[in-house]
Image (tube, helix red, strand yellow):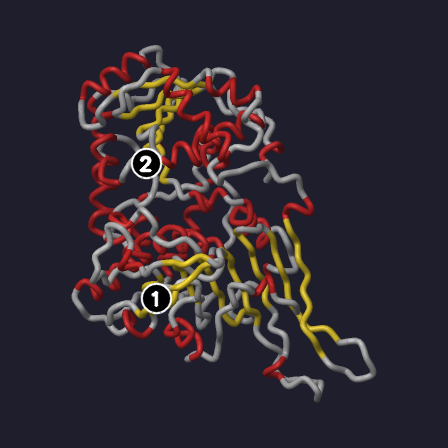
Amino acid sequence: MNMEDRVTPAPPCVLVIFGAAGDLTKRLLVPALYNLRRAKLLPDEFSIIGIARADKDDESFQHDFDDSMRKFASGSENGADWKWLRERMSYLRGDLEDFETYQSLGKRLASGGNVLFYLATPPSVFAPVIAQLGKAELLQEHEGSWRRVIIEKPFGTDLRSAKALNRQILSVMSESQIYRIDHYLGKETVQNIMVFRFGNGIFEPLWNRNHIDHVQITVAETVGVETRGKFYDATGALRDMVPNHLFQLLELVAMEPPTCFAADAVRTEKGKVLEAVHPFGKADASRNVVRGQYAQGGVNGKAVTAYRSSPDVDSNSTTETYVALKIMMDNWRWAGVPFYLRTGKALAKRRSEIVIRFKQAPFALFRDTPVERLTPNDLVLHIQPEEGVTLSFGAKKPGPKVVMGGVEMRFDYKDYFEVAPSTGYETLVYDCMIGDTTLFKRAEEIEAGWRIVQPLLDAWSGGQNEPPSAYAAGSEGPAEADELMARDGRQWRALDQDEKKP
């Protein structure tokens, strides 16, 4: 949905940003707020309190965003909307571990009203910040007002830590106050999956094991680890992307129709998908999962050093920068249908997409087109960099002979709708302000995601799997990922497929 279609501004509130000096705030959050203001979705009674350790005043805090807004928010240079937002930004110097910071914040919020706390901080301080907010009684809700907290990923590093974090924050606040954010769900194509599936009678009857051969979910990045070596070497591709981003896409593709589009109804059906995932056994860590790590190579004509040569990365690191998984479902709709998931860094193309491969015709009627050469019937949901949908199918080539060729029908959002500027956070922040939890994860969904991958983490930490396979930066990933598909007589959709002529 285009933001301008939402005509109702959010209710009055104060947005408190912990980690206000960080990259996320400058690149994504504040530009998203600016876009919401342009779309007339912020209330007149709106203000921002940024909290960080640096010694500065309100004016210098506002000034810090002028350059970043010019870079990340189109039209802000001379815009009245940026001036409006800038004037509502104030600064509070404070240490997140110091209770006095929260006492000072309490004095600023003494007038009451709605408050949204945004934790744009390292995950290690999620629980301490919420504990301090609780101690300062800043999470207490009163009649006619609310207090909510947005928590960024990663939510834990494994099943045990995710459970512990949930226990800690739920001891201070209620589940209804917690908004666990995944910015992937702010993308239009991702939100459109449910509309596409459940709002079109031509697709939903085919969305099952009787008609679908397999599903591919890809999140490929061209960037390497760059300056995030310390974080990434302790995390890896599986932890960083699979229990959150990729599983969110899996849930939307595989879920049953909810009884309505109310938040709890949608989230309940999404949760059932993770419950239906067949558990990974000991052999799966090597047979149905591929780990890779990028070596020296080139991406888009630029040389890329090997992952192990990156700053703050162990020279003998066995951390994966690529992971591919084969997942099976234990339910009626998807029994026997494999879901192949892959994500990686320093790959040939930046692509996030979902491929629905329909079953092939049982035999070829046309002698000049053997069945193995028939055009695959792929429904591709493009998430980034372009947003849209592509359907490929066979058609007769012009000429006296009946010969089939592959063609495509493509829908691009930008060609049909006026696409508002977006960082991916606009919808999520707005939904939090209005109290719509549809696109946010509940505690049990978080834990279910970690429960699926925990056997893999255990196997790798216990030395039960081979080190990651090397792949050249700028390639499509390790050869073992291709072999994972080839064993089943299938292959990945090429990352540059959109650039190839049919």
Q: Alpha-carbon neighbours of circle 1 within 10 Å: few (<14), some, or many (≥20)?
A: few
Q: Residue furthest bottom?
A: 367
Residue 404 horizontal/vertical position (percent): 71, 78
> Label 2 near label 1: C-beta < 8 Å?
no
Q: Is residue 71 left or right of residue 156?
A: right
Above or below for 318 versus 63 = below
Any mark on residue 345, and which?
none
Residue drawn at x 59%, y 31% is 6
Q: Nearer the viewer, residue 476 or 144?
A: 476
Q: Is residue 1 left or right of residue 45?
A: right
Residue where numbered disc 2 is placed: 175
Q: Alpha-carbon neighbours of circle 2 within 10 Å: few (<14), some, or many (≥20)?
A: some
Residue drawn at x 35%, y 58% is 275
Residue where numbered disc 1 is placed: 278
Q: Examine the rendering and report whether any part of residue 54 can be seen.
A: yes
Residue 216 horizontal/vertical position (percent): 48, 64
Above or below for 106 versus 427 = above
Residue 62 horizontal/vertical position (percent): 41, 20
Residue 165 horizontal/vertical position (percent): 23, 41
Q: Amino acid at mark 2?
A: Glu
Q: Residue furthest right?
A: 400
Q: At numbered mark 2, what does the secondary structure look like: helix, strand or loop?
A: helix
Q: At numbered mark 1, what does the secondary structure look like: helix, strand or loop?
A: loop
Q: Amino acid at mark 1?
A: His
Residue drawn at x 48%, y 76% is 490
Q: CA distance from mark 1 to mark 2?
A: 28 Å
Q: Quadrant of residue 55?
A: top left
